[in-house]
Amino acid sequence: MTAATEPYVLNIGPQHPSTHGVFRLRVVMDGERIQDVEMVVGYLHRSMEKLAEERTYTQNIPFTDRADYLAAMSGNLGYCLAVERLAGVEVPERASYLRVIFAELQRIASHSMANGTFVNDAGAWQTPLMYMFRERERILDLFEMTCGARLTTNYMRIGGVAFDPPEEFYPAIESLVDELPERIEEYAELLVDNEILLARGRGVGIISAEDAINGSLVGPMLRGSGVPWDLRKAEPYCGYDRFDFEIPVGRQGDAYDRFLVRLEEVRQSTKIIRQALDGLPSGPHKTQIPLALRPDPGEAYARVEGPRGELGFYVVSDGGSAPFRFHIRAPSLINLSLLREMAIGASLPDAIVALGSVDIVVGEIDR
Amino acid sequence: MSALRMGRRLPRRTVPRALMALGALVAIGFVAVNVAIGYVVIDGRLDGQWYDVRDLGIGVQELREWLDDRNAQQPGILDFLGQHWISYAVTALLGATGILSIVGGALLILIWVERRLIGRMQIRRGPNRVGPYGLLQPIADAVKLIQKEVLMPRGADKVLFFLPPALIFIPMIVAWGPIPWGAQMAYLDVHVGILFLIAVSSLTTLAIFMAGWSSNNHYALLGAMRTIAMMISYEIPLSIALLSVVLLSGSMQLSTIVEWQSTHNVWLAALLPLAMFTYFFSSTAELNRTPNDIAEAESEIVAGFHTEYSGMKFGLFYAVELGNALFVAALTATLFLGGWSLFGLEEWIPGYLILGAKISAAYFLLVWLRGTLPRFRLDQLMKFAWQFLIPLSLLNLLIVAVEASVFARWEVKGIVSLGLFAIVNWAAAIILVREWARRMGYRPEREAVRQPILTQGVGGLQAARRLGAPEMGTQV
Amino acid sequence: MPAGPRQLSGEAVAAPVAAAVPDAILRATDEWVEVRPERIADVLRFLHDDADLDARQLSNLCAVDRHDRFEVVYHLQSLDRNHQIVVKAIVGEHDEPSLPSATAVYKGALLQEREVYDLMGVRFEGHPDLRRMFLWEGYPGFPLRKDFLQIPEHHPGLPKFPFEESGVQAR
Amino acid sequence: MSVELAHYLTVGAMIFGVGIAIALAKRNAIAVLMGVELMLNGVNLTFLAFSRFGGAFDAADAPLAGHVFVVFVLTVAAAEAAVALAMAVLIYRRRETVDLDRINLMRW
Amino acid sequence: MDSAGIIVAFWLLSAIAVGSAVGVFLARNLIHAVVLLVLSFVATAGLFVTLSADFIAAAQVLIYAGAIPVLMVFAVMLTPLAGRDNGNSLYVVPGVLLGGAFAVIVAIVAIDAEWGAAGAATLAGQSFETTADAIGDALLGRYVLAFEVASVLLLAALIGAIVLVREDEPA
């Protein structure tokens, strides 16, 4: 109905089924069309960066769990890499492999969640999410087996990993990796060619390659827009150059492309885990570091390719046992830089789908 | 370090053997008794002496006659109310109680059924804690809902806010009136049954609008607007689809339509595939169920028009939603699946059981849709209604009209003419849908399934251009 | 050396920048380039447009409170050439620090600059929408500053929940 | 006691009268339209009453003439409502009011 | 002598129909007025049922309770500022007087008039049977020209409404 209408403000969130946490959008709408959008965040702000200035380097690792609580392993890894770079700690080979295995498992878990909630945002009544949870559950079981926690793993340590996986871990992960490709094909069959999902996802929230780079987008957002950028290839940490895998790149830059990219990344991650398991060397899983690590004054910026993209940790040392400054470059927050570009002019359902394809984690936005 | 937890499953609760045996025994006994009575009745030995348990309608008929007799013999003080007032009152009470209890009981069970079914579809268990197999879950839910505080938002229109939950219940219950449950078992067998149903269900629109408008909430208003837009759009193809049923069977009375199907030994679903599809799809739109649940799109507008309702007021909306879904299943079963008839088997099995089975089947389809599909967008649905369903159902109506007039004039066995119609209608449905979809620009074979490009190298804009990522958008 | 593996040394960046944007460079180490804050936008513009440096993406933006001054750190990267550039703007003023915004060059700076402003109190002139982000308008002080807890009135006693009531956030 | 033709005619007249009052007294164009619809409704009731009591059920030359008339009235009412409401919306959009006292476009 | 049920139904439905029609006049809020109007229409449909007009009653509910109020509600919603007010104009006194006078005069005439056989007939006179077939025959037989004209009128109204409300295409 295109008749006389006047714009009104719609509050989406902080409690809303599709904001995935306490995240709020103030939307100025004209009928069903969005005229302006503004995000209101901070409901989950815990001031981690300030708290970290009072704790030792090792004590800060749990914060990185709780920033991006869907990708705790990646957060652990990025922070440990930064501190290792700052303090010049060497990491044993086995630890690197284990880190790769767990980071990739975490990526699979997180992408499953992201794709499930994306389809949920497109209107499915929980079913894809439940299927995606099936694999995520098994991965979280693996985490629990290894480090005792499922969500906030606190597994990586400066100089390695906290524990060697137990004996029963290996058959479990073997069977998981054997079954995963089959399961992914099942999802692809169910979802990729789904007529309704195509109708809802294609042409929604388009971001051009140029905009994506300029807007500091990272991860599946950037790759969905056609830019082949993956830190695992560009800046191989933890020996990622040893593994053979490919970067999926979208063709159109819309929400559906991001969905496809995530699905493909799960496949590639399975490949990486398989290779890492095959080549897992024996040896120590950790380097001994002093209890109170006191790196020389200086700074380090280390980044890993988390599930949501470039997860950077900027750590400044003044020679003390606590970081002088600790900053998390949060991909969830920065991926929202182009929210206005995606949402303005779109209809409300499209904007919700576009927001779902960004895959935000509010713990990481607010920190 | 935890134990091996891979492949861990919830312990499967097994049905006690004794219970299963008992259930089987009861079922077999029920069928046996029914068959025996049916045999005796058909045999003629009990005819006219005792009413047939397979048809409660006969029993009620006899009750009425007996009451009228008594009334005529013994004049009472209330006779100024008319000659048949006792039988009117008694049958009205009986029928109303029957409908209310059947629909109410079905609603209670359906909540459980739907949640269990969807749980199964979503590889989880569904409610299984309250009572055996979680069967008491709906009651627990109801108790919880009743206990909850009823909130009214500030700035809400008081009267209009409190009316809709009750108001919306009326069409849902009244619509059950004309459904025939057996040969003589229709509570309100009006001659203009289908028109009556359409009219009654159109009353829902206003209640929904009242709920959405009076809530003083943007989500609710958006939901109400969406509902109204959907209902207006989808009422047209729905009515046209029902009209083709009326044309072919020559009556708007539901019992006559079922009898028509029964005498010609055919289900209208076989004769009118396009009408049935149109009806079913439009109904999902009117019901706000996936894939057309845009009016209550949870991920977009939270709960649509009943966002602000809490406690049992919400419970009423929820119950009405389920009840309407059940009603659509019932109407589908009645109009397109032969109602209470089952190719002569209704002589042996009570009609209401046949109808119940058919309703369950149709309802399962609705649950299946809900458990499977994502949601369309409002404009896509509108486009589908106006550009696809309405023209197609009009063309279908034209074909059916020709067939109906042929059927009325052609002196040939039903199996010939109706078989011919079935072939023509199926062919027409397939061709129409296919060609119209192509005219609308739907060509799936031309678009390859999109797959991401796989690459080994990294790079920025130049690499993106090399890979062939198109220049999407401009510098915004 | 803590420098990232693909990081250009500060000296290598400083030379072309000094040629293009005179008197912008304060100092160049082997890790980063220190830039006069008032010229930071020009420097970023040059780094973004220059074909060799090609710093098309602003990877990270944050500020460090050095007690007497603020360092605003820009991690830039070129995706095509796969290198990283670290630029620091040293803001000497500690009470009311401000410098030009990078939003004209990088849209990715929109939220990051808001975050820095919110938590550090560094004003970015020319930012289109510089408001508090995590905290509300009127929150006393900037919590990531080193002296935040030393200022008695800044003990976060949460006087009230002020925004929206006062309409500060209304657009 | 019984219900007769005159009862129905009286009710129809009352509904019609209220319709007149609304149509004349209301400022809002949509309210005026409601009044008109009420008037039509009263007329419908009269038609049906005559059809029922006048024995038109059986009249050989014009069976159910009253009913047919009502069908046409309903048709016209629907058409009228659509156009009138479209005009109300249009007038609002052009002149920012649906107050009939202020809509004097055709007065001069 | 009619049965009491139908008498009760008649008086009840009449009261509701007339009362809610008066309510339309008195309501302050236009949305309330629409709701009361629907109530009046539904009650009138009930009166139609007492007159053995089942088809017309269903059609009345469908059109007057389902379609027209929705149109009105949309119109009210689309005229936001003036939309909610159901105020009276200058002609309120003449309007009420005229309407009341009409009702009274017609009622007096209806009651006093000599209706012949029709006046003596009661509702119990004929059994309830369907009218849909007969109406269909009449519409497509004796009144087919009027039927066609009405369909053309509907089409014209449809197109007219669309043309009126359609916004100009952006150039």
Image: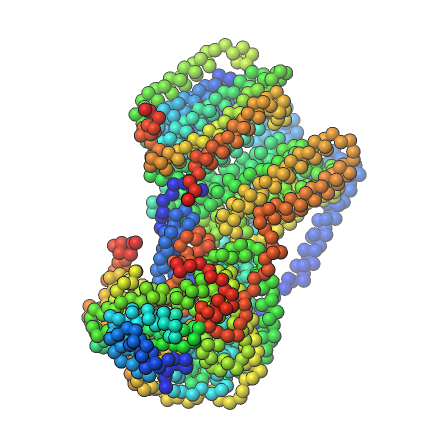
Q: Where is the C terminus of chain B found, in terms of image quarters?
A: bottom left
Specify the quadrant of the image occupied by residue A90: bottom left
In the shown orientation, is residue B454 left or right of residue A213?
Answer: right
Image location of residue D37, percent across then percent down = 44, 27
Q: Is residue B173 above or below residue C13?
A: above
Q: Residue furthest front?
A: C19
Q: Is residue B373 above or below residue A361?
A: above
Q: Is residue C78 above or below residue A164?
A: above
Specify the quadrant of the image occupied by residue E23: top left
In the shown orientation, is residue B134 left or right of residue A340?
Answer: right
- The residue sitting at 47% across, 25% down in the picture is D41
Q: Nearer the viewer, residue C159 or E111?
A: C159
Q: Nearer the viewer, residue E157 or C135?
A: E157
Q: Is residue B62 visible?
A: no
In the shown orientation, is residue A78 left or right of residue A135?
Answer: left
Image location of residue E143, percent across then percent down = 59, 21
Q: Is residue A58 above or below residue B96?
A: below
- The residue sitting at 54% across, 28% down in the picture is E152
- The residue sitting at 56% across, 84% down in the picture is A279
Q: Is residue E170 visible?
A: yes
Q: Nearer the viewer, residue B282 or B157?
A: B282
- The residue sitting at 36% across, 40% down in the picture is E80
Image location of residue B474, percent across then percent down = 42, 59
User: How was this image coloured?
Assistant: rainbow
